Image (spheres, rainbow, N blue to C red):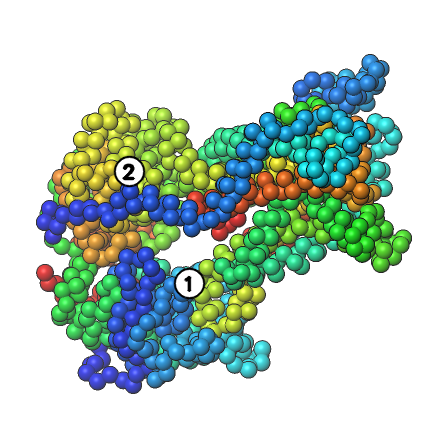
Amino acid sequence: MSVDANPQVAEPEAVPAKAELSQWAIIRSHPSIIIGGILLGIMILIGVIGPLFTADPIALNPIKRLKPPQGEFLFGTDFLGRDVFARVVHGARISLVVGLAVSGIAVFIGLIVGMISGYIRVLDAIIMRIMDGLMSIPAILLAIALISLSGATLTTVVIAIVVPEVPRVVRLVRSVVLTVREEPYVEAAIAAGTKLPLILYRHILPNTIAPMIVQATYICGSAMLTESILGFLGAGIPPEIPSWGNIMAEGRTYFQLSPWIIFYPGIALAVTVLSVNILGDGLRDTLDPRIARKM
Amino acid sequence: MAKKAQNKRPETVLEIKGLSVTLPEGADREYAIQDISFTVGKGEIVCVVGESGSGKSVTAHTVMGLIPRKDLTPVAGQALLSGEDLLVKSEAELRQLRGERMAMIFQEPMTALNPVMKVGDQIGEMLEIHTSMSASQRAARVLEVMADVNLPDPKKLFDTYPHQLSGGQRQRIMIAMALALEPGLLIADEPTTALDVTTQAQILDLIKDIQERHGTGVLFITHDFGVVAEIADHVVVMQHGLVVEQGPAAQILGKPSHPYTQMLISSVPSLVPPQRPEPEVRDTALQVHDLDKTYDDGGFFKKGRQVKAAQGVELVIHRGETLGVVGESGSGKSTVARCIVRLIDPTGGEVMISGQNIAGLAENALRPYRRDVQIVFQDPYRSLNPRRTVGQSIVEGPMNFGLSHQEALERARELMRVVGLAPDALDRFPHQFSGGQRQRICIARALAMEPKVLIADEAVSALDVSVQAQVLQLLDDVRQRYDLAMLFITHDLRVAAQVCDRIMVMQNGVVVEQGLTAEVYANPSHSYTEALLGAAPGRNTEFAKLA
Amino acid sequence: MLGYVIRRVLATIPVMVIVAAFVFLMLRLSPGDPASVIAGDYATAEDIARIREQLGLNEPILVQFTKWIGGLAQGDLGTSIFTNLPVTTLIAQRIEPTIMLTLTTIIFTVLVAVPLGTIAAWKAGSWIDRAVMVFSVAGFSVPVFVLGYILIYVISIKLQWLPVQGYRSMFEHGVGPFLRHIIMPTLTLSVIFIALIARMTRASVMEVLQEDYVRTARAKGQSELKVLLSHALRNAAVPIVTVIGIGIALLIGGVVVTESVYNIPGLGRLVLDAVLARDYPIIQGLILFFSFIYILINLLIDLSYTLFDPRIRY
């Protein structure tokens, strides 16, 4: 039989509009994206506009120190008589900024280093040994050391948390690159004379986007936790700027009598991290079912 | 070949009666299988044959009770094992029957065996589940069945792990396991598809032999009419979940009555090479001289083992000619192709194209020569970037070589017509096309580079036989139309016979024989070529040529 | 086999050197003057000069690096600025509670997380599975110290079942007091670890349950329990053990926090005290110590793969 006598004209059944609709259906079938998204949205809203409506978070009021939550002080007061509610609302900013900044920077650096490592054999061995080394340093200790050397500011805290997160991103990106570079469509592009930067951009990079979005949410959550731990250990942002970690650190001494100083920022932190993690799980199930089985 | 006269069929082991199984909601059809009926008799091999999506595997798994009932629900009919309906059995009752009265072997023996368990123990597990034998009795029985399936030195193999065995040995272990309790019914789901042709022949012989000696009824699922011709007593042809035709093997293969069966059988390429015009002496398009590729898996701290994937390979292809490279897995045929396209770097030798040796060229110096050699891969589902439109995929190469987007698109439109697809499909995505259509797109993408040499690396192996015939025809058409030199790599001797002018046989990285296709097939000079041809399933059967 | 072990052991050396070099460079390359940051706001010029001297910041970088690596090779992790004691001595004094807490946590975690994850995978989609997944998401989200304070508040202060804080050595005070003091820290520290390992176990077992050989086992008529235990779990062992090893890093971070919540005089408290006293050499020595421990544990785990999977080549 000849080709012309039996034309195999493509009659694709799926129309684009239908595909978009089904994407919505998928998101709706994963309620965790909606739940996590809404929760996170609320926390962001509180962080952005909340401080406009609260009392002054650093105003001292020694007469009303260590007041339990009631009336004027929704979350009580701390040992200097500062309004815990105001401090918690202001603290949301630090947590969110740290979370977003760390995940953004770590993913960006990890993406570049991971692509290089995955595609350039000579550098791969060296880069991966360095990453192995970095990964074996406990993240919190590394952050503590970096901060004790250069002082605790928002920038140093962010850098100190980014450094130990990078290797995880590098490994993930590298593993995606190593899988995808063996795909016949990448080999076809090589055979067609496409240059390396274009191959990375066109054929490899798009495959890393879904796992990177998912990874970014997890990093965001863990960065917020690390920030609070640093604050709690006294190695974080100084108490003049309220952060959930340093509010709780200051509450430690008074814990038995005034537990609210620790509980309210603790709950705020847990809810925020939880919303990010729920969102991450939902995105993972939706964007990348293959990875979903591995995480 | 002598087939038993099948007018009277033996005592029934398995009877499928009006069986229907639904697919989950949202599938492309309501039923996986619909109202199918057939029987398997004692000591009889029944082949269920069909293309992908025909429902043949679902049938086998339904009988074994191995389908997820949530997704695939039997809604009507019966599956009677010696008169007992399997569909109404409880899970515990089914467990009792599985292994003891019916057993199953699968397509891929490597993955079907537990990688962290000794093979002897895996066979022994069957006895442990269903009998009260002592450990020593079990071991003795395991050695007995291992010997029964002709495994060499059962005592030694007992303590090996699956990865230490060859593909054929693994499938023998699977068969030994299935037969340990002498079940009345053996279900074999494409048991030789993942094996090399010579191993396949041995396993088919073994199944036939066992079934004759033990009187086992065999339900054999396959897509390959060669295999059907080799072992079937009775054939059931399925399409889209329906049985379209069934009958004794000789009748189905020789005088099929249903148009679908006729089409399938006439699509099976003949092992006899057709008359091809004597190739005139033409310009050389590609010359490979003394090509070597050695893999060294050594590391920093350890001595590497060297694997010689290709050694001293010589080949020449002229314009307008097709050179076939045949061999089993590990023969080095794909290594040669990948060296020529320079997806991997040869460790030695020359690859001459357009007067230049490209074997050692650095990427930048190599790039101008890349357009001269293009390749079509095996897997149509991974050969196109799922995130880019077909048009983007086709124009990528030409634009690398200076064509404007408009010109490249014009060329892509024309090539879509050449490969038999509508030009306006260029802005669709790969997932909107079938496997055969994608392979056509890949051919168009290769042609867009205006290459001198086109390499087809198992390009039709993943396709159903009816689609395969069309793509083969297309490859032959474009070779003539563009005066291409074609390097056709395949494990399938039937396919090679139909499209190759000359043929080259590889084994363990070395070319053992080359010559005109008709001559090699008629008078193989190397014993390995002879073995390959002797193992081709269905070689003694003349398939009905209709249509 | 022996060759394999030797190769693996040798392969950890470059990683250790990289860790050491990184820690060294951190001090030398940090922006600003680390000596004055460490000395604090009220330090005199002499204080800063003394600290600079003690940190070796006055010497040329290569000389100092050679000395430093040489010292490390002989087990010298540095000297405290304020007590002038070698860091190794400080570690020896404080290590027992940390080892005990880590061990009880790992044991408790594995006993809880592996069965939970396996059952969740087996009953994927059921309420048990959902509960495990919800627990694991929550476990990742609650900060260790908040959890610790909640436990103290409920169990010690309100119910008065267990002591609030402190540590009793099993060897000096006996098993009873040891257990009464270690239960809550162990629970606190385990939660995030259980979340991690249950999740990983679930994922690995689920993946293995899709494998052809599980289908083969079912085709043999094997019972679901046996399929799960002798086929699925055995094949999932390598990823599970791997994640336990990686989780050690998480655990070390958690130990620091947990010890400070429960006032346990271990290495974690040593870190905290060093942070408060700005005793950088202790922090630096402990980083090296924990990193090397982490590398060694993961080396052992690497070597243990051969027990689980015959395909791993020696």
Q: Closest to the observer: B50 or B66?
A: B66
Label 1 and label 2: CA atoms lie apart by 37 Å
Q: Nearer the viewer, residue C102 or B499?
A: C102
Numbered tag placed on residue B429 in the rendering = none
Of the two numbered discs 1 and 2 in the rendering, the one whose residue sits closer to the viewer? 2
- Foreground residue, C121 or A245? A245
Query: What residue would you read off at disc 2?
Result: B389
Q: Is A123 situated above or below C205?
A: above
Which secondary structure, mark 2?
Answer: loop
Is residue C45 shown above or below A107?
above
Q: Is residue A69 above or below residue B241?
A: above
Kindly tell me whether residue C73 is visible in this rendering: no
Three-letter code, disc 1: Pro
Residue A83: x and y, percent?
A: 71, 32
Q: Chain of mark 2?
A: B
Where does the image place residue C298, in percent across and percent down from the top left? 65, 46
**Badge 2 density bin: few <14, some 14–19, many ≥20, Cα 10 Å:** some
